[in-house]
Amino acid sequence: MKAILDIQGLTKTYRDFQLGPIDLQIPTGSIVGFIGENGAGKSTTIKSIIGLVHPEEGEIFFEGNRLDPKSRELFERIGVGLDELHLPKEMTITQIGIFCHKFFRDWDPSLFESYLRRFSLSERKKMKELSRGMRMKLSLTIALSHHPRLLILDEATSGLDPIVREEILDILLEFIQDERNSVLISSHILSDLEKAADYIAFIHQGKMVFLEEKDMLREDYALYSPKETERESVDPAAIVASRKNNFGETWLVYRNRMPKEWRLDRPSIEEIMLFYLKGEKNESLNI
Amino acid sequence: MKALIYKDMTLSWRWSSGIFLLLLAILIGVGITSGIDNTWKIVPAVFAFHTFILLPLTMGYDEESSFEAFALGNVATAKTYVTGKYVFAWIESVLGLITTFVVGAFVARYPGSELIFYVLSGLLIPLLISSIMLPPIFKYGAEKGRGVMAILYILLYLSIFGLREYLPGLYEWLSSLPAFPWLPALIFLGVVLLIHALSFVLSVKWQEKKEF
């Protein structure tokens, strides 16, 4: 698996939170969904990649080249979309286009205008006149219009209605049609990632839990609600975590360790995440 | 950096034009009451005051929108961002130099040997103001930085006020130097440029440490 972005040993310490060490590789030509609960370290990881936060340890490589915050040359090929578009509210979209033309070396004005038309964004509008959905569309437009190889989006679809989110996901899927392009997107809206992501990276309490192919994840894991009589016949190592509810108990299990004849349910990404976060974990698995 | 200067000019041109017109009106008023001989000498102060208002204004716009997160999360370095603000100050200073020279030499027709101090003031006073103003704003932000800056200016004013009895003696000493006024002018230029350079280094250092 060739990685467009390779994070090695990333560590950042705050007073009451430790991120890392994080090792994460973003495969070329893929969309990686970055998930985790609030405060897990998603934004800190992303900000460390783009240089808004200074990690104590670790190295980050983009296309094999080490990213250095003091030399932003490589960032010409990285498009960034944060949870808010941090441009002055008095600037019009036209002025933002002129600014970006001077700011980015490979800025493509015709591509910028085509995205503005696609998103129905009026060039005369000022930033302060744009709704949140419009600002996120503009953020994505800017990120895409300097021909990046990697898009990094941090909660860029949060707070948006389903129609806007669908538009954005379509754009991301088009973006990776060029197999050299990749996307790293953090989101709490797991249904979006179910649709679009190729890989899921799960972070919990500052540590990477897994990076797996989305389809394999849903194949590797399963849900099962056992009867009392069935508990003894299950390999304990098959049970990742369990959750009790009013109707009994449900297990998140490794599919290949369960009896083949048992009817197991396919979990969603959200269910897998909830079991990791809220379930009673199998301590022997050291998850 | 061109992009950053374009952004600052785009955001501040209304305020900039308004302030210039106001200052021009004050100049005209002073000129009418006091004559051109005294009026043209306060042209450097016009550009100094303009710098004093405009630089915190542009920093305030950036802080309001967290623009640094956009710039430094994309292709701008901390050094580029800081340089953009200092270049803005240099633009003010060069305009101040040119304007003071044109008005002093061709309108007031002031003799060259004394003209040099006023022309240099047109260049160096805005530079000095930006040198004092920018580091606290980079360190503490536009709001708190203005407070620190105000304290620095008060201290500077009190120092000059406290030393005022020595100023005639200082002028006499400067006049006695060889190659007056050129040597004292060069000393003045050198000191301000040194302060400016130190200010720039400090601003870059503090900006590089920031996290968003």
Image: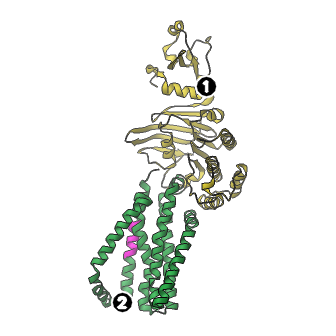
Chain colours: A yellow, B green
Q: Quadrant of residue B37?
A: bottom left
Where is residue B77 shown, x and y percent of the image?
A: 50, 57
Which secondary structure lies at badge 1? Answer: helix
**The disc numbered 2 marks a residue on which chain?**
B
Q: Magenta segment: does it hold B90? A: no
- Quick one: A63 or B171, which is closer to the camera? B171
**The disc numbered 1 marks a residue on which chain?**
A
Where is residue B96 shown, x and y percent of the image?
A: 49, 79
- Side of A237 where A2 appears, left or right: right
Is the N terminus of chain A in the top left, top right, bottom left or bottom right quadrant?
top right
Query: Few, some or many C-alpha atoms within 10 Å of disc 1 (few <14, some 14-19, many ≥20)?
Result: some
Q: Is residue A258 above or below residue B66?
A: above
The residue that disc 2 covers is: B180
Q: Is residue A156 above or below residue B103?
A: above
The amino acid on which the numbered mark 2 sits, given as a three-letter code, is Phe
Q: Is residue A192 above or below residue B84?
A: above
Where is residue A74 shown, x and y percent of the image?
A: 56, 52
Q: Is residue A114 visible in this depiction of the protein?
A: yes
Q: Residue at x 56, y 36 (%)?
A: A188
Q: Magenta segment: does it hold B196? A: yes
Q: Quadrant of residue A224?
A: top right
Where is residue B72 shown, x and y percent of the image?
A: 51, 54
- Side of A188 where B130 appears, left or right: left
Q: Is residue B98 visible in this depiction of the protein?
A: no
Label 1, label 2: how far apart the Cα atoms are: 85 Å
Which secondary structure lies at badge 2? Answer: loop
**Residue range (magenta):** B191-199
The residue that disc 1 covers is: A218
The amino acid on which the numbered mark 1 sits, given as a three-letter code, is Arg
- Quick one: A27 or A188, which is closer to the camera? A188
